[in-house]
Image (spheres, rainbow, N blue to C red):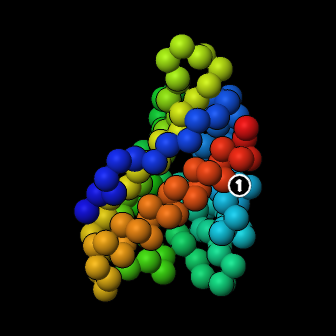
Amino acid sequence: MRIGEPDHARTSRARAAAGWGLRFAADWLSHITSSSLGERDRRRTLGNPEGKSIIERLVAFHDEEHQYRYVIVEAPFPVTDDISTRRVHAVTGDPTAGQVQWSGRFIPTGASEDEVVALFSGIHGGGLVALRTAFS
């Protein structure tokens, strides 16, 4: 399953690029209360307000393209084989602006496809709103 169209947020390209890395989620996501790195910065453990952990592993990182891809290793989500990508694109005609794209694909388990699409659309969409607010 893949979430239909990738979610986007437009903001200052420099600010978006500054906050796009794996390290910074707790700085701009209100539903993430902690973030720590391990495995030479390739594994991230996030904490949420309910005390549950989300463990992600970086699988691709392209600094020049402002893009990274990660998989969820462990999380309280009803999915398997989750892989997500975040990238910052330049906005044509405005060299100071950037557009953040966050997309993912997964296999639902224990929930309907529609329920899981709604869950991740909310996470990605809410995260992009928070990113735009934090870096605009």
Question: Can residue 39 be seen at all in this image of the molecule?
Answer: no
Count the numbered circles shown. 1
The extreme top residue here reads 93
SS of the residue under disc 1: helix
Q: Residue at x 59, y 56 (%)?
A: 127
In the rendered view of the protein, which quadrant contains the C terminus?
Answer: top right
Side (left or right) of 13 relative to 120 = right
Counting from the top left corner in percent of width and height, residue 79 is at: 35, 74
Q: Is residue 44 above or below residue 5?
A: below
User: On screen, 80 above or below 123?
Assistant: below
Q: Is residue 1 left or right of residue 41?
A: left
| Residue at the spot of label 1 | 28
Q: Position of residue 123 (x, y in %)?
A: 52, 63
Residue kind at label 1, given as amino acid type:
Trp
Where residue 6 sits: x, y (%)?
40, 47
Q: Please give left or right for residue 6 compared with residue 20 in the image.
A: left
Look at the image and tell me whether residue 116 can be seen. Answer: yes
Q: Is residue 66 above or below residue 117?
A: above
Residue 17: which quarter of the image? top right
Q: Nearer the viewer, residue 57 or 105?
A: 105
Is residue 117 rendered to the left or right of residue 10?
Answer: left
Residue drawn at (58%, 77%) of the image? 53
Out of 61 and 112, give the one closest to the viewer. Answer: 112
- The image position of residue 86, as x and y in percent, is 48, 45
Q: Relative to 124, is 93 above or below?
A: above
Identify which residue is drawn at 44% across, 70% down. 119
Quarter holding the N terminus? bottom left
Residue sitting at 54 percent across and 13 percent down? 93
Density class for disc 1 (Cα within 10 Å; few <14, some 14-19, many ≥20) is: some
